[in-house]
Image (tube, rainbow, N blue to C red):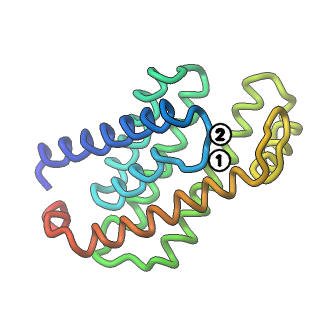
Amino acid sequence: MLRSKRVALIGVFIALGVSMRLAKHVLLGPIQFINIPAIFTIIAGALIGPVGGFIVGVGIFVISDMYILPGIWTVMTSFTMGLVGYFSGLIWHKRQRIDKLELIVIGYLMMLFYDIVTSIVLYIIIGFPILYAIVIGIIGLFFPVAGGYMVGIGVLTEVLTVLTISLLLPYIKENVTEVSELE
């Protein structure tokens, strides 16, 4: 793919991810039920490649956090989402067709990794001991702990995110002719 097309596509995915994350935040507040940056990051990685996926993942969180609430967590959430984009590029970039079951399973594992790592690091940053941060970082995905109030919010977020990706990505890879020109 031409460098200018790649850069433009990266910019479009970052702009979509930032604008939709901010819109969700304005309309619904900080309630987490779908990971909009992950949707655009994984799709970008699959279309553009590992480096493009990494840039989109980092870019969405860095830019949108500047509007929502930047902090030390921005470094971890953006870097970890960048890794999700990078690995989605390694796994799905060269494929014309994507198996939905594989996408759901691997996508869910990526989202689980992202949620666990960012939760643990957040708890460590705010002062919890490491072992306690690990325990509540994992349990907090399923039960309300350390100030949480929703049961199963991690699972709900991961499932809705992956289902959205599984509907969009195979369709884009199979039906948008310009995608084949990106390779």
Identify the image quadrant of the C terminus.
Answer: bottom left
The mark found on residue 62 in the picture is none
Tell whether 115 sits left or right of 139: left
Q: In the image, residue 117 lies at what x, y percent?
A: 67, 44
- Give the secondary structure at mark 2: helix
The residue that disc 2 covers is 118
Does the residue at mark 1 contact the one at mark 2 (Cβ under 8 Å)?
Answer: yes
| Rendered image quadrant of residue 144 | top right
Give the residue type that dot 2 points to: Thr
Q: CA distance from mark 1 to mark 2?
A: 5 Å
Q: Amino acid at mark 1?
A: Asp
Q: Is residue 112 above or below residue 64?
A: below
Q: Residue at x 54, y 28 (%)?
A: 75
- In this orientation, which residue lies closer to the viewer: 43 or 148? 148
Crowd tier of the residue under label 2, counting other residues whose Cα lies within 10 Å: few below 14, some 14–19, many 20 or above: many
- x 19%, y 68%: residue: 176
Is 125 drawn above or below residue 90 in the view shown?
above
**Residue to which mark 1 is pinned:** 115
